[in-house]
Amino acid sequence: MKVLVIGSGAREHALVRGLLADPVVTAVVAAPGNPGMARDAQCDSLADVTDAAAVLALAARHTVDLVVVGPEAPLVAGVGDALRAAGYAVYGPDAAAARLEGSKAFAKDVMASAGVPTALAHVCTTVAEVALALDALGAPHVVKEDGLAAGKGVVVTDDRETALAHAEACLSRPGGQVVVEEYLDGPEVSVFCICDGSTVRALSPAQDFKRIFDGDHGPNTGGMGAYSPLPWAPAHLADQVIEVIAQPVIDEMRRRGTPFVGTLYVGLAMTSRGPRVVEFNVRFGDPDGQVSLARLLTPLGGLLYAAATGRLEDMDDLHHRPEAAVVLVAASAGYPASSRSGDVISGVPGVSAVSGVSAVSGVEGAVGPDAVVLHAGTALDTEGRLVTAGGRVLNVLATGSDLAEARDTAYRVLGDVSFDGMQYRRDIALAAARGEIHL
Ligand SMILES: Nc1ncnc2c1ncn2[C@@H]1O[C@H](COP(=O)(O)OP(=O)(O)O)[C@@H](O)[C@H]1O
Ligand SMILES: [Mg+2]
C-alpha cells in the first residue's frame, strides 16, 4: 500500500513514521513534508495544502492507495471531498463533517442533538447578546471565536471588559459569530477517536500543555508537550468517551447525511460532574497525538485504511503498549507572539552539513531505540545546515517503562539540541509522574 501524507509538521512526521512501521505500507510520500520527513520518506512539493487540485495531482502522480490529511485547514477547505470524488481512499473528513472543528457553533448544535455533555453555551452575533450571555453564565468568562483561529480564538478571563473586547474584535470580522460558554473546571484530556463514518475506536488518552511557560503561565500556544497514559484518569475513560461522546456524535453526523471519516479529537475537561467536551477537532492533536500514536501497537496503515474504507468494524479493538510516552516541543525565539527563522540547530542526529534535501535522505531520525526527533518548523539553509523555520521547531518523543523514565530520556535528548532563542518547558508530565494530579 502506498500512502500520501499531507502536511509539514511534527504530527505528520509521526504519521509518516507510524505508517512506515506497518509492513503493509510499501511507500510513503509526504507533501510538502520537511527535512525530518525527507530522511524517512519521499517528499514532494505542495505550495498550499488547501489547494485541492494540487493535492489531487499529487495523489495521481504517485498512484497512492490512501491519502492521510494531517492538518485541519485542508479538511475544512474540502480537500477530502475532492479526493473522495476522484475515487481515493481518504483518511480525514469531508468539509461538511470538518465543520465540527471549523465552527464551534456547529459543534455545539451537533452536541445538543446528540445529547453529549458539554459546557452550556450561547451563540451570539451582537455585542448586546454577548453582554447578556456573560451575565447569565457568570465569571470566569469563556468567549470563543466561531471559526478556525489557529489557537488564538479563545479568551478565558475573570474580567468582563476583556471578554467583551475579545467578542467585539471577533464580531467585527465579516460573518463574525462567537460562542460564550460556561467555565469548565478540571484537568484537560485529549482522546483521539478513529472513525469510519459509523464505527469508532479510541486511542489511549493524552494530556497536552498549552501555555508557553512552566506552571501553565504565559500565553496559549499550539502545544508545548504531552504525555500518555494518564495514571490519574479513570481506567475506562476511552471506552466512556466512545459511548457517551464519540459514538453519539458519529451517529448524529451520519443521520445528517454528512458521515465523519477520520480522527474525531475529543477535547475534554474532567470536571467534578464527569467529563465535559471542551471542543472537537477533526485531526490528530499536535503534539498530543504523537504520544497516543507512539503507544499504539495496532499497525497504523491498516487501521487508517480500514477507517477510510468503512471497514473499522472488522478490526479488533486497538492495542497499546504499556510503556509511557512523553513529547517535548522546542520552540523558536519570540513564540507564540512571533517566531524567528534561520537560527542554526545543532544536536539533531542524522543531519550532515551538505547541501540539498536529498543529501540527508536515508538517515534515520531515531536517537537510540527509545527516542526520536520529529521535525516541525525546520528547513535546510543554502549551506545545508538545519535551521529554524517557524514557531514550533521540533519535538523530542521518548518512551519508557513509566512517565518518569520517558521524561528522563526525552529531556536528556533535548539537552543535546540547541539553537539561539530555543524555548521549552521543564515541567512536561512532571506532576503526573510524581502522582500529584487528583480528580
Ligand atoms: N468552557 C471552558 N471552560 C474553561 N476553559 C476553557 C473552556 N473552553 C476552552 N477553554 C480553554 O481554552 C483552550 C482553548 O479552547 P478550545 O475550545 O480548545 O479552542 P481552540 O483549541 O480552537 O483554541 C482550552 O484548551 C481550554 O484550556
Ligand atoms: Mg483546543
Image (cartoon, rainbow, N blue to C red):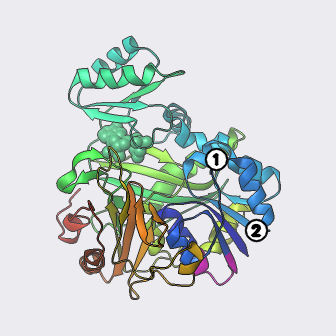
* Mark 1 closeness class: few <14, some 14–19, many ≥20 residues within 10 Å: many
Indicate whether 340 appears above or below 354: above
Amino acid under disc 1: Thr
Within the magenta stretch, is there residue 235? no
| Element at label 1 | loop
- Magenta: main secondary structure equals loop
Q: In the image shown, does 313 or 87 lie closer to the viewer?
A: 87
Q: How far apart are the alpha carbons under marks 1 and 2?
A: 19 Å
Range of residues picked out in magenta: 19-27
Mark 1 highlights which residue?
50
**Left or right of 286, for residue 304:** right
**Left or right of 359, for residue 292:** left
Amino acid under disc 2: Val
Residue at far front of view: 383
Viewport quadrant of the C terminus: bottom left
| Element at label 2 | loop
Residue 278 in sight: no
- Name the residue rendered at 66%, 73% in the picture: 28
Mark 2 highlights which residue?
64
* Mark 2 closeness class: few <14, some 14–19, many ≥20 residues within 10 Å: some
